[in-house]
Amino acid sequence: MNNKKIKKLFINFITSNMYYQYDMDTVRKVIFTNLLCTLGVFFLLIFGLHAFLAQYYTIAILDYISATILMIMFIYIRIKKSYIYPALICFTIFGLLFIFFVITGGYKNSGLLWTYIFPIFVFFVFGTKIGTIGITLFLSIVLTIIILGNLNYIPVQYQIDVVYRYIASFCSVSIGAFCFDYIRERMQNDLLSKNKKLRSIRKRLVQANHLLNQQVITDALTNIPNRRGFMDFYEKEWSRALRNHKELSLILVDIDFFKPYNDYYGHLKGDECLRKVATALYQCVDRPSDMVGRL
């Protein structure tokens, strides 16, 4: 298997075959959700086994249940080609799991350490507005749990110095994730706006080019094809007649006594006469392979 096939298989794996179907921002979110599910399953299985061997059975069961749900979400993305619901479920699972670790202290009182993953995931997948609401709510719940612990309402207590450092570090990570996603959103919006303008300009250029081509091959007076337009049409029909072994008919029309009429009534009346004759001839044309032109 060559490198191109390996690269294609890897891209299809992390994007759930959505790489060529959606915009790059959606693909990035799909990749992030897929990686979160994959890494979450891998580490939760390891930590669940470790917790089980250490006789932390509640943590082990929660790890295994969470890993199973994440695996289902990974499969769901590939089947439904949508990342929104899996991302929300991952958001809920990790949020509840981290809150549980904060309440119980986790393994050797390390529950607070896992919460730093939360800001990066929330801001990247859900954006700055929803991410800010989610992080504020999550931090409020964690601080409430810490306060309840220090008031002896729950068994786990955290030292006040640790709490201060945790709040400062968690807010720093959250602000960094917010700034990164804010800049990313602004750059993406600017790029989309510029692409929209470019598409609009390109559309107008195509229309202008089409109009210009029509003007080049159209007689300005009679509004029927001029000599250039006639020759282009003639060459196409001549080639088609040769391919199909068919005849090609050509009728030359001249207006009798047009010069005396033009000299007597003037050029304006002469031009009007040419337009009426051209209109009358054009109305006789029914088939797409027929045309009237002015040589």
Image (cartoon, rainbow, N blue to C red):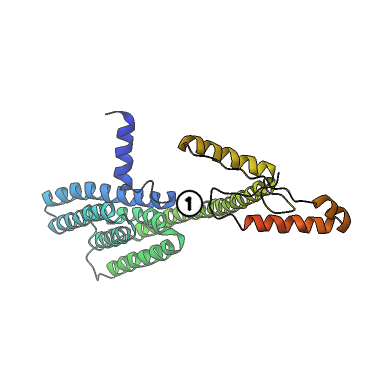
Left or right of 228 on screen, residue 47? left
Q: Position of residue 172 (x, y in %)?
A: 44, 54
> Which residue shows up at 41% across the image and 66% down it?
133
Q: Secondary structure at mark 1?
A: helix
> Which residue shows up at 39% across the image and 62% down it?
135
Q: Residue furthest front?
A: 256
Q: Nearer the viewer, residue 210 or 47?
A: 210
* Residue 156 in which image quadrant: bottom left
Q: Position of residue 274 (x, y in %)?
A: 75, 55
Q: Nearer the viewer, residue 81 or 148?
A: 81
Q: How many marks?
A: 1
At label 1, the amino acid type is: Phe
Left or right of 255 on screen, residue 154? left
Q: Residue furthest top?
A: 2
Left or right of 166 on screen, residue 243? right
Name the residue beneath numbered marker 1.
180
Q: Nearer the viewer, residue 279 or 124?
A: 279
Image quarter (top left, top right, bottom left or bottom right) of the N terminus: top left
* Residue 277 in which image quadrant: bottom right
Badge 1: how crowded within 10 Å, few (<14), some, or many (20+)? some
Q: Nearer the viewer, residue 265 or 234?
A: 265
* Residue 145 in which image quadrant: bottom left
Q: Position of residue 127 (x, y in %)?
A: 44, 59
131 to 23, vertically: above or below = below
Q: Position of residue 117 (x, y in %)?
A: 34, 53
